[in-house]
Amino acid sequence: MDIRYFGMMRLAQAFGPALRFRGADGVNSAAAFVNLLSVHALMNWPAYGAYSAVEAACLSAAQCMRAELRPGGLKVLNAFFGPLETEWFQTVPPPKLAPAALAKAVVAALKDGNEDIFVGDIAEDIRERLKTNPKALERELGSH
């Protein structure tokens, strides 16, 4: 919580005013605050329960930041992803997302003006299943 959530809040407090000023620059506005969020911010994965809860808190803060910063022209992008090819998720079976693929998707989303993106097979699967039957997804994630 201290690193992920409060760290994000400290970044927003430190850089938000400057980014908002840049965002209000009209034609030259090129400022965005990008949140890299586990897709489990949207549905808790009990195997990583505390991690999912912190990600949910970060999503809530990002939604608030978006509302507060939008009038100044600053965009807030949430990039939802599944397990990454990192040491943290080494015991999780594939598919995993390469960090470079996440970075590429973020750049494309910024160019396209998106506010929320889902990157990788796991994130897309959870997105679709949340639309269809969120309770079934909750039960399935809780059984692993």
Image (spheres, rainbow, N blue to C red):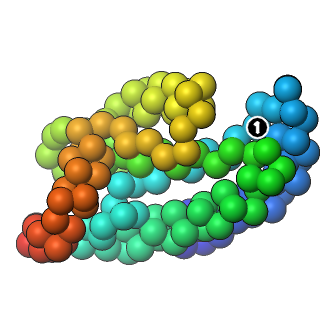
What is the total number of numbered labels drawn onto the structure image? 1
Give amino acid for label 1: Ala
Residue at image point 52% right, 49% down:
78
User: Of 68 and 55, which appears nearest the observer?
Assistant: 68
Considering the image in quadrants, where does the N terminus appear?
A: bottom right
Measured as percent of width and height from the top left, residue 101 is found at 40, 27
Side of 141 where 12 appears, left or right: right
Side of 3 where 32 appears, left or right: right
Residue at image point 90% right, 35% down:
25
User: Is 86 placed above or below 39 here?
Assistant: above
Query: Circle 1 — which element?
Result: loop
Measured as percent of width and height from the top left, residue 82 is found at 31, 48
Is residue 109 visible in this depiction of the protein? Answer: yes
The image quadrant that residue 73 belongs to is top right
Side of 11 where 109 appears, left or right: left
Residue at image point 36% right, 38% down:
119
**Crowding near the residue tagged with mark 1, few <14, some 14–19, many ≥20 C-alpha atoms within 10 Å:** many
Residue at image point 40% right, 63% down:
41
User: Of 85 and 114, which appears nearest the observer?
Assistant: 114
Considering the image in quadrants, where does the C terminus appear?
A: bottom left
Q: Which residue is mark 1?
A: 31
User: Is 115 placed above or below 53 here?
Assistant: above
The image quadrant that residue 48 belongs to is bottom left
Measured as percent of width and height from the top left, residue 89 is found at 29, 50
